[in-house]
Image: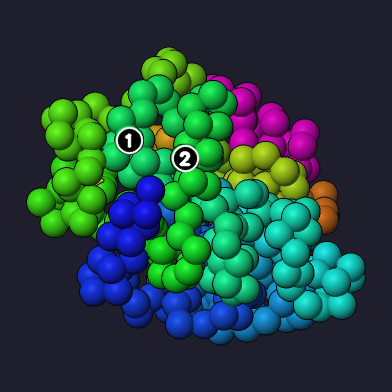
Amino acid sequence: MPDFSNQLITWQKQFGRHDLPWQNTTDPYAIWVSEIMLQQTQVVAVIGYYGRFMQRFPDVATLADATQEEVLQHWSGLGYYSRARNLHKAAVTIMDAHGGQFPQDFDTIQTLSGIGRSTAAAIASFAFNQIQTILDGNVKRVLARHFLIEGWPSTPSVEKRLWLLAENLLPKQNMVTYTQGLMDLGATLCTRSKPKCSACPLVNSCEAYQQQRTQSLPTPKPRKRIPEKHITMLIFLHGDKVLLEKRPPTGIWGGLWSFPEAEADCNDVDAIESLAKLRFGFSVQANRRLPLLTHAFTHFKLHIQPQSFTVQLVASKACESGQIWLKVEDAIAAAIPTPIRKILQSLQNELQLMRQDGSL
Ligand code: SF4
């Protein structure tokens, strides 16, 4: 389908994006970092993070030398934290197993933590000018619409079809422009809702447009009831400091700092007070409850009830490894997920009130 790629290449040269911070370079490290950050995240959200990350970790050696804690701190708020942990792990692998050189071989790139086929293809294409096929969410949407492919694109049979199609569309030259063009079209014109078909270079051959199916394609993911979970987050205050705990290395918010938790939406303050004594070795006095917060993950919805307590006596047990007392403003700047930052910000207001009524 030479028309498809030629039209896309011509369009990209004139209307595509050319000045994003990770463009106009063939440095595989810079391209790799951007590709990982852009997974499931919009360009506009990534730009600031990317600049700060590259300033602190300008090359693979610096990233490999850093602690995971610091890498997570620079990722804090961007979500999908396994991306940051994998990035760090892969940097160590590049230093240890590849002499500090980003591998050029397509299969070897895919052996690095967190790099799947499409991400490897983007790196190989942009950094090494290899002819490789990308198929991220944006590209799936463009192909599903243009070629009227039914079925949720992540269904294995549909995905296989899309990969074959994407391979057959590859141009023999202008690979970088073509790959960028596919990304740009999906991000700027062939958007999830209200695609701007009148400006699209593929409008004359797009089957979804011809058949007025752009709103129903790609086929959405089959709906499943999203499970909901309720927890109480325990905010232990000692003076102007809060107790944070490091979460286990994998799983939700893996490796980030968070508050200790009680399982359910716990109204039983007495039970929490006993738990605090038993687990941390200190007595607490309950303060006001903070506003309920709901955070949506991909697979479930988490309802968080933050409850603050004033700690009467801090025993050494509360300073075990994996636990830390931080001033609220320092905690806000630590490697924490977004909901914890929101709670800490509302805690700052709470502390203000407590100072006003003399309870702090
Ligand atoms: S014509 Fe519309 S639906 Fe078809 S590829 Fe272009 S933007 Fe997407």
Q: Residue at x 16, y 28 (%)?
A: 211
Check disc 2 and report its element: helix, strand or loop.
helix
Query: Can see residue 324?
Result: no
79 up-or-down from 356: above or below: above
Which mark is first along the chain, 2 or 1?
1
Q: Crowding at label 2, few (<14), some or many (≥20) Cα neighbours within 10 Å? A: some
Which residue type does callout 1 highlight? Phe
Verify CB contact (< 8 Å) between mark 1 and mark 2.
Answer: yes
Residue at the spot of label 2? 165
Residue 8 spot, x, y in % from top left: 31, 60
Q: Quadrant of residue 183?
A: bottom left
Start-end of magenta stretch? 261-283
Check disc 1 and report its element: helix, strand or loop.
loop
Which residue is more in the foreground, 217 or 260? 217
Q: CA distance from mark 1 to mark 2?
A: 9 Å
| Residue 266 painted magenta | yes
Which residue is more in the foreground, 30 or 46? 30
Residue 163 spot, x, y in % from top left: 53, 40
Q: Residue at x 60, y 80 (%)?
A: 27
| Residue 201 painted magenta | no
Which residue is more in the foreground, 320 or 71? 71
**View quadrant of ligand 1:** top left
Query: Can see residue 121?
Result: yes
Residue 202 spot, x, y in % from top left: 23, 51
Which residue is more in the foreground, 257 or 233? 257
Residue at the spot of label 1? 147
Q: Which mark is residue 136?
A: none
Q: Residue at x 78, y 77 (%)?
A: 101
Q: Quadrant of residue 272?
A: top right
Which residue type does callout 2 highlight? Leu
